[in-house]
Image (cartoon, rainbow, N blue to C red):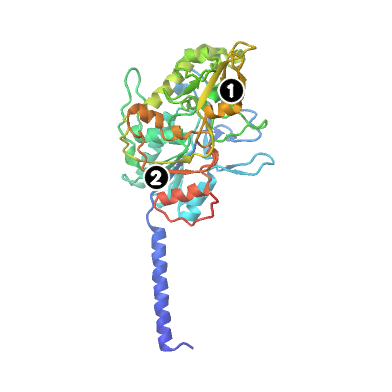
Amino acid sequence: MLKRGQKSSLISLLAIALLMGVTVLTVAAQDKTPVIIIPGLTGSELVNSKTNEVVWFKAPRSKDDDLRLPISANMSRNRDSLVPGDVLRSIKVGIFPRLDVYGGLIEAFKTRAGYHEENWESPTAAAASSSIFVYPFDWRLDNVENARLLIRKIEKLKLRLKQPNLKFNIIAHSMGGIISRYAAMYGDADLPTGVRKAQPTWAGAKHFEKIVLLGTPSEGSALALSSLVDGFAIGGININLPWVQNLDRFDLFTIPSAYQLLPAPGTLRVLDENFEPIDIDLYSPKAWSKYGWNAIDDKRFPSQFKLAERRTATAFFAAMLDRAKRLHEALAAGSGAPKVSYNIVGAQCNDALDTLVMYRDKKSGSLKTMFKPSGFTKTSGDKVTADELKELMLADGDGVVTTRSLESNTQSRFAGVPSILEPTTNKFVCEEHNKLAANDAIQNYLMELFGNVPVLVKTGK
C-alpha cells in the first residue's frame, strides 16, 4: 500500500505524464500544410476510359491499346481513349522484385509524419490540414495543359473546402517539376502565340508554400533527344523488357511532353569528332533532318502512320518543337525573381549524359550521333576510346538529369543572375533518378522541410 506522500507523488507524476501526453498529441495534431505529389514522366497509370483496362503500366502489354497519340497540327484535338488513373505506387514485372515508385513516399508521410490521403473529388472535412493529394496526369500530353489542369483542380478544391487562402506544399518529381513551375508562374494561362513573349504573372504562386523540385530537368535532358531518335528510355520509370510496352521513336514522335524535355534553347552541348563544339539549333526541323534525327525521314515512317497523319506530320513536328521552345523560354522568363519557395533535391553521384559527340562513319559515310560513350575511329584514322569519351560526354547527376539542368546553371548564366530559380534550399544525396522518391533520407528531409519531426528510419545513405 502506498503512503500518503507516495500517492501524492504518483498523482503528480501521472499529471505530468498526462500533460506531456497532451503536449505530444497537440504537436501531432497541429495543422500541417497539405502536400501535393506530382509524378514524373510515365509515373501515372493510363486507363482505357471505355473498358477501364490499365494500359500503362502493365505487363504484359495491352492487346488493344498503344501509347501513341493521334497527330495533327491542332494539338488540342490529338486525343485517344486513355485517361489518367492513379499515380504509380509500385510496379511488379514477372519474377522481378516489386519496385517502389511513389507508394513508399506516400506511406512515409502517413506513418512517420501524421498525414492522411485525400481525394480531389470527395475531400473530407479534414482535407485542409495534414493531407496528401496525388496528381496523376496523362504524361504524354502538353505540360502546359497539365499545369493548367492542376490549377483548376486546386481552385475547385478550395471552393469545396471553403478555404480560399489555403496553400499547398508540392513534391514534384522529374517532369512534374516542369508542371509545378509553370503552374506557379502562369496559373491557368496558356503560352502566348505569335511574336509575343511570355511574362510571368506568378498567378499560381498564391496556391503554394514550398515547391520541391525532385530531380527536375529544368534545362531539359540530352536523353530526351536520344529517346526521340532511338526510342526506349525517356526518363521516369526506365524499363526496357521484351514483354513490357516500350516506347519506340514513332510512339515518341506523337507525344508532346517528349519534346518538352529536350535541352532548353542554347543548352545542348555537341562536339565533332575532333571535340570542337558544334552550334545546333535544336528547335529547327531542318537541323533534325540534317543530322539524321527526324523520324519522318525514317524509311519505316510510312508504314507506321495513316495517310492523313503522314500528310500533317511535318506541320505537327514543327509545332511540337516550337511549343517546346516556347515553354522553355516561358520558364526562363522573369529570371531571378521567383514568387514562390523553390527547394531543389537531387543527386550528384551518378553520371548523366551531358554532351553529344558526332562523327562521320568511315564505312557508310553517314553522320553518327553518339549518345553513349563508346570507342570510334576518326576520319583521320585515329582511334578514340570509351574512357576518353566518358570524360567529355558525362557529368555529375542522378544518371538521367545532370546537376547543370537540375539547377538551371546554363540558363542562369545566360540571364546574368546567380540562379533563375533562387532556391531556398539545395539537398543532394547519392541516388538514382528513378529512386529519388523512394529514398529514406530524402523522405526524412522532405518531412523536416515541411516542418515535421518524422519518426526516423535507418537510411544507410
Given residues 87 and 359, the one toward you in this image is: 359
**Residue pictured at 57% horizontal, 23% vertical:** 251
Given residues 119 and 42, the one toward you in this image is: 42
Percent from the top left, x then y, of residue 236?
A: 53, 35
Given residues 103 and 430, the one toward you in this image is: 430
Percent from the top left, x then y, of residue 49?
A: 54, 32
Q: Dot 2 corresponds to which residue?
A: 169
Percent from the top left, x then y, of residue 169?
A: 39, 45
Three-letter code, disc 2: Asn
Percent from the top left, x then y, of residue 273?
A: 54, 18
> Distance of mark 2 from mark 1, alpha carbons?
37 Å
Residue 182 in view: yes
Report crowding for label 1: few under 14, some 14 to 19, many 20 or more residues within 10 A (C-alpha): some
Pointer 2 or 1: first along the chain: 2
Q: Nearer the viewer, mark 2 or mark 1?
A: 1
Q: Quick check: marks 2 and 1 in contact, CB under 8 Å?
A: no
Residue 74 in view: no
> Looking at the rendering, which quadrant does residue 357 occupy?
top right
> Looking at the rendering, which quadrant does residue 76 occupy?
top left
Q: Dot 1 corresponds to which residue?
A: 230
In the displayed structure, does residue 57 sit left or right of residue 192? right
Three-letter code, disc 1: Asp
Residue 130's tag is none
Q: Is residue 66 above or below residue 345?
A: above
Which element is circle 2 on?
A: strand
Q: Is residue 452 above or below residue 174?
A: below
Which element is circle 1 on?
A: helix
Q: Is residue 289 above or below residue 102?
A: above
In the displayed structure, does residue 248 sit left or right of residue 187? right
